[in-house]
Structure formats: structure tokens, C-alpha cells
Image (cartoon, rainbow, N blue to C red):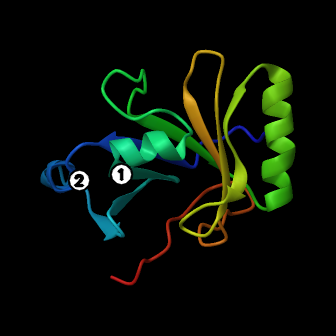
């Protein structure tokens, strides 16, 4: 696993309210399919439904689930890299919470938790290309 985080996704209960909050702080993002993307230096900050994020991480949604409302993401350059990294995660003591598959949005992803229960997504999304140094630049979503 390369030492980088490409996306930080915050699970929110009211997308419009959260988007307005960050915009009031001067952030400018793009809303696409009930998700807001902000370029934040070399990574992306994402706002998405808290319940949908929990399910996407293979965790139970809801206030008593233990899900903290945040997920880290590590994008890679191929589906094979997703699979290889997941094998290392399990070997290192992580817990696979969502098997690798093409998700509802159309890219290949999986999720795991570290030994303390922090959720990570591992994804190959050709729409989010990585530079040679691993830097992510969010695409222009047509706005």
C-alpha cells in the first residue's frame, strides 16, 4: 500500500446543510448524484449520506452502530491492485467489511476496517486518475 490518502469522506445527515457550511467557509465544490466533492490540496474531501457511507463500508448504519461517520479512501491504479492490497490487509490483521466488486456507481471497490475499527475504502476508479506520485486531482464533473 502506497503511503497516501486520496479521499476523506464525511458521512453527513443533511447534505445541503453541510455543503452550505463548507461554502460559507470559502470552499467551492461540485455536487454530483447526491455527493459533494471538494478539491483539498492533493486529495478530495467528500460529503455523502452518513447511512449510505456506512453501508458502502460494509457497516451497519444508524446512531448506535459504532460507525463514526468518516471513511478514508485509498485509490489504486487497477482492479488487481485492489485485490492484492486486500490480501495484505487481512494478513496484517484488518477486517474485510465489503468484498471487492463493481459498486453501484460503476467502479471496483472494497472496504475494510483497521484493528481499531476505522473504515477504509480501496478503489480502482478510472474516473479519478492518479499522477505518478499518487496525487489525486478530482475531475471536472461538467460544471
C-alpha gap between disc 2 and disc 1: 7 Å
- x, y (%) of residue 18? 20, 48
Q: Residue furthest top?
A: 116
Tell me, yes or no, if residue 69 can be seen here: yes
Left or right: where does residue 2 sit relative to residue 130?
right
Quarter that holds the N terminus: top right
Numbered marks: total: 2
Query: Is residue 133 left or right of 105 when viewed as pictured?
Result: right
Q: Quadrant of the C terminus?
A: bottom left
Which residue is at a point 70% across and 26% down the rendered structure image?
95
Residue receiving disc 1: 48
Query: Residue 77: x and y, percent?
Result: 76, 61
Question: Circle 2: is it few (<14), some (14-19), or many (20+) Cα within 10 Å?
Answer: some
Q: Is the Cβ of the residue at disc 2 closer than 8 Å to that at disc 1?
A: yes
Residue nearer the viewer, 45 or 109 = 109
Which element is circle 2 on? helix
Q: Which residue is mark 2?
A: 15
Left or right for 19, reference 69? left
Q: Helix or strand or loop: what does disc 1 sit on? A: strand
Q: Position of residue 142 (x, y in %)?
A: 39, 84
The residue most toward the bottom is: 142
Residue 16, quarter of the rendered image: bottom left
Residue shown at the point (67%, 71%) measured from the top left: 126
Q: In the rendered view, tell whether residue 127 sits above or below residue 58.
A: below
* Nearer-the-camera pick, 41 or 47: 47
Residue 134 sits above or below residue 88 on the image: below
From the top left corner, tell me how far across and down residue 66 is, in percent: 42, 20
Residue 124 in view:
no
- Which of the two labelled residues, at mark 2 and mark 1, occupies the earlier sequence position? 2
Amino acid at each position: 500500500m502506497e503511503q497516501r490518502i486520496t479521499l476523506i469522506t464525511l458521512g453527513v445527515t443533511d447534505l445541503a446543510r453541510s455543503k452550505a457550511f463548507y461554502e460559507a467557509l470559502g470552499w467551492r465544490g461540485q455536487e454530483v448524484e447526491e455527493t459533494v466533492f471538494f478539491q483539498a490540496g492533493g486529495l478530495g474531501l467528500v460529503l455523502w449520506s452518513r447511512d449510505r457511507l456506512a453501508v458502502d463500508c460494509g457497516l451497519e448504519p444508524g446512531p448506535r452502530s459504532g460507525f463514526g461517520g468518516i471513511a478514508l479512501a485509498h485509490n489504486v491504479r487497477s482492479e488487481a491492485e485492489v485485490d492484492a492490497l486486500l490480501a495484505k490487509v487481512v494478513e496484517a490483521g484488518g477486517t474485510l467489511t465489503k468484498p471487492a466488486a463493481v459498486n453501484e456507481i460503476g467502479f471496483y471497490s472494497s472496504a475494510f476496517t483497521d484493528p481499531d475499527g476505522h473504515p477504509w475504502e480501496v478503489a480502482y476508479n478510472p474516473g479519478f486518475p492518479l499522477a505518478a506520485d499518487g496525487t489525486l486531482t478530482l475531475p471536472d464533473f461538467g460544471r
